[in-house]
Image (spheres, helix red, strand yellow):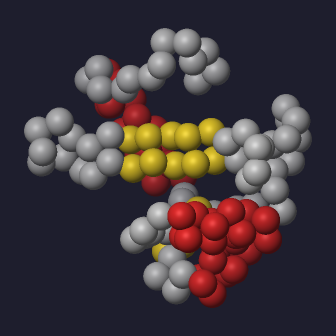
Amino acid sequence: MGNRPVWIGYDANGSSGNGDSGGVSVNVPPAVPGGAGLEFEEQAKVIADLTFKYNVQHIGIDVTGGNGEAVYQLVKKFFPMAVPYTFNLASKRALVLKMLQIIRAGRWEYDRSERRL
């Protein structure tokens, strides 16, 4: 990515030790507000570069729409264990409800200076 800005998202593991594992996401925003992101070949290259930088054990790709399916097809060539995820209205609703549950339980934390949430 060179010096291009990235966004990082993180979901921490459960505090009791019995929760889910932590997860981090590095995302490349559009170059200009409202602009398009990287072409699918470039997206797959970013993922490939991460596999050289980290000991990657899992790659999950949303193939519901957009370039996801094309990115997945390229990624599975160098990472055959990549998993495609297809979301529907019910699964998206479940994700939103889970996020609301996390917020209501006071488990969602973010940098106080971050205003664009």
Give x and y (percent) for residue 84.
54, 72
| Whole-percent x, y for residue 5 in the image | 73, 39
Query: Where 6 falls versus 20 (above or below)?
Result: above
**Residue occupying the point 85% across, 32% down:** 33
Residue at horizontal 48 percent and vertical 19 percent from the top? 111
Q: Can residue 35 be seen in this snapshot? A: yes
Q: Is residue 96 above or below residue 72?
A: above
Residue 55 percent coordinates (x, y): 42, 68
Q: Quadrant of residue 95?
A: top left
* Left or right, 52 with reference to 108: right
Residue at x 56%, y 40% (from the top left corner): 8
The tally of labels here is: 0
Whether 3 is drawn above or below 55: the answer is: above
Q: Position of residue 73 (x, y in %)?
A: 67, 81
What residue sits 44% from the left and 68% below the top?
56
Q: For the C terminus, which image quadrant?
A: top right
- Residue 63 visible in the displayed image: no
**Residue 42 occupies which quadrant of the picture?**
bottom right
Residue 14 picture quarter: top left
Looking at the picture, tell me which residue is in the foreground, 60 or 48: 48
Question: On the picture, is 113 further left or further right than 70?
Answer: left
- Relative to 75, is 34 on the left or the right? right
